[in-house]
Image: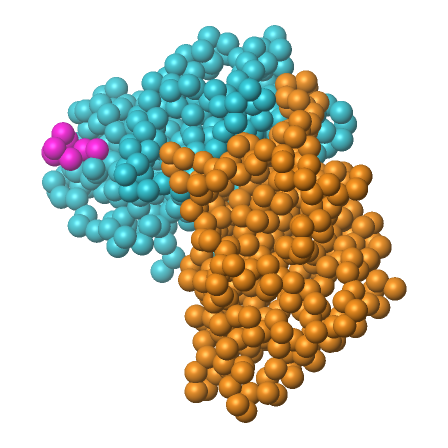
Chain colours: A orange, B cyan
Amino acid sequence: MAYNFKEVMERPDRLASGHRMCAGCGAPIAVRGVLRAIKPEDKAVICSATCCLEVSTCMYPYTSWKDSFIHNAFENAAATISGVEAAHKALAAKGKVPQNYKFIAFGGDGGTYDIGFQSLSGAMERNHDMVYVCYDNEAYMNTGIQRSSATPLYADTTTSATGKASSGKTQNRKDLAEVIAAHHVPYVAQTTFIGNLKDLHEKSEKALYTPGAAFLNVLAPCPRGWRYEAEDIGEICKMAVETCFWPLFEVENDVWKINYQPKNKRPIEDFLKTQGRFKHLFKKGNEHLIADIQKEVDHRWELLLKRAQ
Amino acid sequence: MAIQDRLSGNEAVSIAMKQINPDVMPAFPITPSTEIPQYVSQFIANGEMDTVFIPVESEHSAMSACIGSQSAGGRTVTATSSCGLALMFEMLYVAASNRLPITMAVVNRALSGPININNDHSDSMGARDSGWLQIYAENAQEAYDNFFQCMRIGEHPAVQLPVMCCQDGFITSHAVERMELIETEKVKAFMGEYKPEHYLLNPDETLAVGPYDIPQYYMEHKKAQAVAMENAREAIMEVAKEFEAMTGRKYGMIEEYRMEDAELAMIIIGSSAGTAKEACDELRAAGVKAGVIKVRVFRPFPAEEIVAALKGVKAVAIMDKTESFSANGGPMGAEVKAAMFGKLNDVLVTNYIYGIGGRDVKVDDLKSVYDKLAEMVKTGKAPEHYQYLALRD
């Protein structure tokens, strides 16, 4: 079905307003985007790892979630939702609960790439009928901007600090969508907030309505950690895609597809300069650092092009 | 008619699971509890039960999935031992605070390190403050009988807490005993259907589980949990009574063995209670007024029952099959002494660490404990420090 922006946006929000997330944060945009792809008549159980999203949307005695929601711990959203899904399988087979439930887990990059990686890998391999959504803001933001394995090269974080003897994180980021694709689950996609959110919506819809396990990696900028003004989030996401720092792609039954190829690939500076975490790279004498990042971005883009051939 | 059989503790608990036929079982293998998920998987493969088995990739995920499943409204069981229980540690607290009556078969084994696969109670004793009920079996029959009762107690409306159904690794889990099984129809009637008041998959009501709790509410929530644990005492006795009506087998918080006129008492838990009873019998035959108090339920702690049982006793040995490194004795030692304080000030008390890491516990070893108690009565003095039993020189 063709994407109808008006129809999709008019669907009732499944995450209530009035939550405590920061203005300009990508996480609730990702959540709303994914939840809008659930058919309004379908039910859902949503799990969140311990993260900004969880502490800001479910503080006793309030909840922002219109669907049933469970928070368990930091590293086990995937295992938790797999338990919910299994119970649904058992209870639905006995006719005790309706069939039309969707199971979604949200986690930040800390809870997904790092501490929750094993739990995620296990749930993906077991191919539960679930969608795991990583809102990737490229560091442990909830604990105060510490580096993660999703943090890009040379980013300034509180545990990859810049200083006289350091230019920020010394390692490259892990490519998690690729790692999950290696689980050969039915659907894996990488997306962010572009234009009218068509890419996010279509991928969410596919992830939700493809039977079996699906994984979405959503680049979700963090104004505190990345150091930008709230209103700049759209431009930052656009530059992430236009520079090929964050390509939009999907892997459907092991077929790789790039969803957007920029006509003119922008230099990585166009992404880096939008954020305070890369400010030190623009000091005179640090040109080679930017060149390192460019080299890595080019390398990964080439790899992706080959995969998607 | 009850069914006579010869089974190991692991087989017995697996058959209990088959008869209950719970909705979900997430599990990860670990010695010596591994056979339980194996047997259950085979029962499922044979079409004898339709539980959804989740072959998780770790015990942490096993308990996480248990929490998800039970919150969703599914009756959920699992099994583990030792390091597996330790890996679940964080999630044990969440299961209890979310008031989820998960039933877990714990096959007690020493914790690493050094790595050791044999029996002691360091695993479940380490988790004694996690908010789970803990019920210990002396033998395979009790492990089987307890499993049904554990689930019923946990699901009791006034309790709604998770329960560990403990048995001793290898000694109980692998040794084959003659025992009596209950007919499945009777089990089904006894267990009833699991109908939680609130659950994630309730189509008529959404639910939020595990919210962030602020200082204004956290204490009240913890108090509610503590009240549930207190309520468990009554539920344990209520369920035991029903169970006795079904099987004729009587259970309580503790079991008193030859305690009527006992002067020397031993307080012990698990399979070693059987050995203690044998030691007690031999001493009784020799005219020694020995008795045994077997602790069946460790959480909630049967303080009143133990104090009542100790009335008239001159000296007591509190036996711990784990070290707690308090430099002041084991967990049972601490609990019993706290229970006795101000009530039984004239009883001489000593605390032993015994049988850890699978060290064999022989009748003679336990008889030597009674000898020590007799000596204490004679001298009127208790040892200042806690002691190790049958330690090599």
Q: Quadrant of the N terminus of chain A?
A: top right
Q: Which residue is situated farthest in the front direction here? A: A6
User: Is residue B345 shown in magenta?
Assistant: yes
For residue B128, side relative to residue B104 (left or right): left
Which sits in the foreground, B324 or B268?
Answer: B324
Residue B327 makes an appearance in the image:
yes
Q: Name the chief secondary structure element in magenta.
A: loop
Which sits in the foreground, A68 or B290?
Answer: A68
- Percent x, y of residue B388: 32, 51
For residue A90, side relative to residue B392 (left or right): right
Residue B23's quadrant in the figure? top right
Q: Quadrant of the C terminus of chain A?
A: bottom right
- Residue for point 33% across, 42% down: B214
- Percent x, y of residue A268: 65, 75
- Residue for point 36% across, 54% down: B391
User: Is residue A208 shown in magenta?
Assistant: no
The magenta segment is B339-346
- Residue for point 65% across, 66% down: A240
- Residue for point 76% across, 72% down: A264
Residue A236's place in the image compared with B53, above or below, is below
